[in-house]
Image: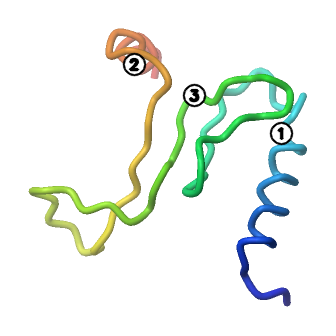
Amino acid sequence: MEPVSSKSCKRKRRLLYLLLAGAYEDYDIWIRNVVSQPSLSDGREWTFWQYTNRERLEGYQGEERFIDMNIFRGSEEDFAAYTSGL
């Protein structure tokens, strides 16, 4: 097993982006990258981006110490339209 390093993480991230390129075109992309803003090699935009898994949220009373934080690419109106179809 390869130890986790920034070099191995970069390689895995690059491989994931290559696997996504040109695939799953009928699906929205929800991608996790806690190092930098993701960009796919085929030019598609992500719909959701998890930018951290170590955030603290005032008022949060769950068991976990940290929570994931995500961004939706779009406006509040876009998000309302996106979620209305669920």
Q: Residues within 10 Å of mark 3 (few under 14, many from 20)?
A: some
- Quadrant hosting residue 75: top left
Q: Earlier in the sequence, mark 3 or mark 2?
A: 3
Location of the C terminus (image quadrant): top left
Residue 79 numbered mark, or none = 2
Mark 1 secondary-structure assignment: helix
As helix, strand or loop, the secondary structure at mark 3 comes to loop
Question: Observer-nearest residue: 2 or 10?
Answer: 10
Amino acid marked by disc 3 = Thr
Label ID, residue 47: 3
Q: Amino acid at mark 1?
A: Leu
From mark 3 to mark 1, how far is it between C-alphas? 14 Å
Residue 26 is drawn in which quadrant? top right
Look at the numbered discs 2 and 1 and tell me whether their residues touch, using CB distance below 8 Å.
no
Residue 61 in the image: above or below residue 41: below
The residue carrying mark 1 is 20
> Is mark 3 in CB contact (under 8 Å) with mark 2?
no
Quarter of the N terminus within the rendering = bottom right
